[in-house]
Amino acid sequence: MIVAFSVAPSGTGHADGSVHDAVAVAVRVVRESGLPNRTSSMFTEIEGEWDEVMDVVKRATAAVLPFGSRVSLVLKADIRPGHTGELDGKIERLERAIADAD
């Protein structure tokens, strides 16, 4: 499965609303998991089996808790049993389709 998620604290007390320090801690948890992952400006994607992916999301969320009075978690999952390597595979197929459309 692939999970795209975003986790951020609120009630941080920062006047500018910045959450990059908290997000950095969460992304570190993901990267240290050893599972395939990538981070963009809005989401972090992680690929693996259900239990291992959800464990990483849970640990990343817990890592953000100390940064505010509450935490928001947004999660989207692509559950496709029997498929691996889709974190890159989906992008590769998209790029081929774009090139073929030209």
Image: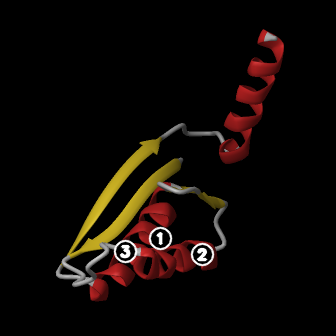
Percent coordinates x, y for residue 11 in the rendering: 18, 78
Give the x, y percent position of residue 72.
Answer: 26, 64
How far across and how far down the image is residue 98, in percent?
Answer: 75, 20
Circle 1 — which element? Answer: helix
* Lower sequence index among marks 3 and 2: 3
Label 2: how many Cα within 10 Å (few below 14, some 14–19, many 20+): some
**Residue 36 appears in which quarter of the rendering?**
bottom right
Label annotation for residue 56: 1
Q: Nearer the viewer, mark 3 or mark 2?
A: 3
Mark 3: amino acid: Ser
Tag 1 near tag 2, CB within 8 Å: yes
Determine whether, in the image, residue 14 is placed left or right of residue 43.
Answer: left
Nearer-N-terminus badge (3/1)? 3
Identify the image quadrant of residue 59. bottom left
Residue 83 found in image quarter: top right
Q: Is label 3 in a helix, a strand or a loop? A: loop
Q: What residue is pinned by disc 3?
A: 18
User: CA separation, marks 3 and 2?
Assistant: 25 Å
- Please, is residue 33 above or below residue 47 in the view? below
* Count of marks, rendered view: 3
Residue at the (56%, 79%) spot, across then down: 28
Image coords of residue 47 (percent x, y): 59, 55
- Residue ID for mark 2: 33
